[in-house]
């Protein structure tokens, strides 16, 4: 998956450069939703290696909570879905360059991000946790990160949180890599989603413990800000509401997280 993602990121960057230097071919008389329906395809970007949100099975099938939520939205819109696994640090560029229509990747709805993107209603809730080796006696809270080393996904809110607390942050691609660095003593801690860490411990295990927890976070689907996406955002919210009312959203949460995390 990582090799594929790097190739796709190269394509994304090439498309971005072309988009900045060339004249676009999109029909500006139609908004984004109309263009998606006309094409008959919803193009979604996600990491593809962040279990249980999106990951490959042993048979090579792409599955996960975000995968099935995205599929539900496409079904509601009456179009096919095309999912592009892309590294975290290339997802938003891909969306802004029209390579994908939207990002469905457990994106925290934050005040800072909301200045740049228009978010859907929340479709899941989680907590951010601080993880260390189980023999670490120096770090008991986020405040203890000052001067310590952490590892997190490049450009993530987890990386930003580590920096806010004065840690020296190392950027890596996956949760597995961050935990390997913690396990081997290369870094002191990592910050990540409680749900993904719990899934990792259930499937892989390891000498890790959670020593602190930040305020809860809500996951939403970001779109490029502006009127072009107003009707698409409205339809995404309707699709999420439909999945919530039918019990499908809660069913997916239990399937991938082990319990219902679709409410605050």
Image: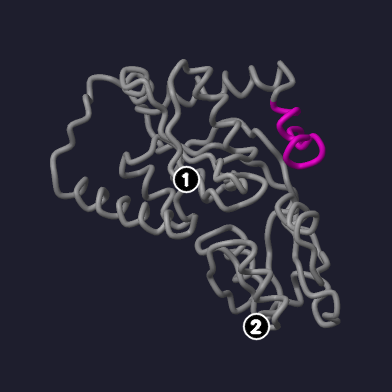
Which residue is drawn at the image coordinates 82% and 82% (left, top)? 138
Relative image position of residue 213 (x, y in whole percent): 79, 59
The residue carrying pointer 1 sits among few (fewer than 14), some (14 to 19) or many (20 or more) residues within 10 Å by Cα, namely few
Relative image position of residue 135 (x, y in whole percent): 85, 80
Q: Looking at the rendering, which quadrant does residue 5 occupy?
A: bottom left
Name, please, the residue furthest toward the front: 59
Question: Magenta span has 61?
Answer: no
Which circle marks residue 186 in the picture?
A: 2
Question: Magenta span has 250?
Answer: yes
Task: Residue 108: tell me if it is visible.
Answer: no
In the rendered view, tell whether residue 49 sits above or below residue 186. Answer: above
The residue carrying pointer 2 sits among few (fewer than 14), some (14 to 19) or many (20 or more) residues within 10 Å by Cα, namely some
> Foreground residue, 8 or 62?
62
Task: Please indicate whether residue 31 sits to the left or right of residue 92 in the image.
Answer: left
In the rendered view, tell whether residue 12 sits above or below residue 98. Answer: below
Give the magenta-colored segment's residue range: 249-264
The quadrant in which the C terminus is found is top right
Q: Which residue is mark 1?
A: 115
Task: Please indicate whether residue 129 sits to the left or right of residue 74 in the image.
Answer: right
Q: Are marks 1 and 2 in contact (CB under 8 Å)?
A: no
Relative image position of residue 158 (x, y in whole percent): 62, 61
Q: Which color scheme did the rendering employ for the protein?
A: one colour
């Amino acid at each position: 998956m990582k090799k594929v993602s790097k190739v796709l990121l190269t394509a994304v960057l090439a498309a971005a450069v072309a988009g900045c230097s060339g004249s676009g071919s999109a029909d500006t008389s139609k908004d984004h939703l109309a263009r998606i329906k006309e094409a008959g395809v919803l193009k979604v970007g996600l990491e593809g290696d962040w279990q249980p949100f999106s990951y490959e099975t042993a048979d090579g099938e792409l599955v996960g909570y975000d995968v099935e939520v995205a599929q539900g939205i496409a079904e509601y819109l009456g179009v096919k879905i095309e999912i592009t696994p892309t590294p975290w640090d290339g997802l938003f560029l891909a969306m802004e360059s029209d390579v994908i229509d939207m990002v469905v990747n457990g994106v925290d709805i934050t005040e800072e991000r909301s200045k740049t993107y228009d978010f859907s209603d929340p479709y899941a809730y989680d907590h951010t946790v601080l993880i260390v080796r189980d023999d670490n006696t120096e770090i008991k809270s986020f405040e203890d990160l000052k001067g310590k080393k952490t590892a997190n996904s490049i450009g993530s809110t987890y990386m930003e949180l580590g920096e806010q607390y004065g840690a020296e942050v190392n950027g890596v691609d996956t949760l597995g890599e961050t935990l390997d660095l913690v396990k081997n003593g290369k870094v002191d801690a990592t910050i990540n989603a409680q749900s993904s860490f719990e899934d990792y411990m259930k499937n892989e295990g390891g000498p890790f413990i959670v020593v602190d927890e930040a305020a809860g976070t809500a996951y939403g689907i970001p779109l490029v800000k502006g009127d072009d996406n107003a009707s698409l955002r409205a339809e995404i919210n309707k699709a999420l509401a439909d999945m919530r009312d039918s019990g499908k959203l809660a069913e997916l949460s239990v399937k991938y997280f082990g319990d219902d995390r679709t409410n605050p």
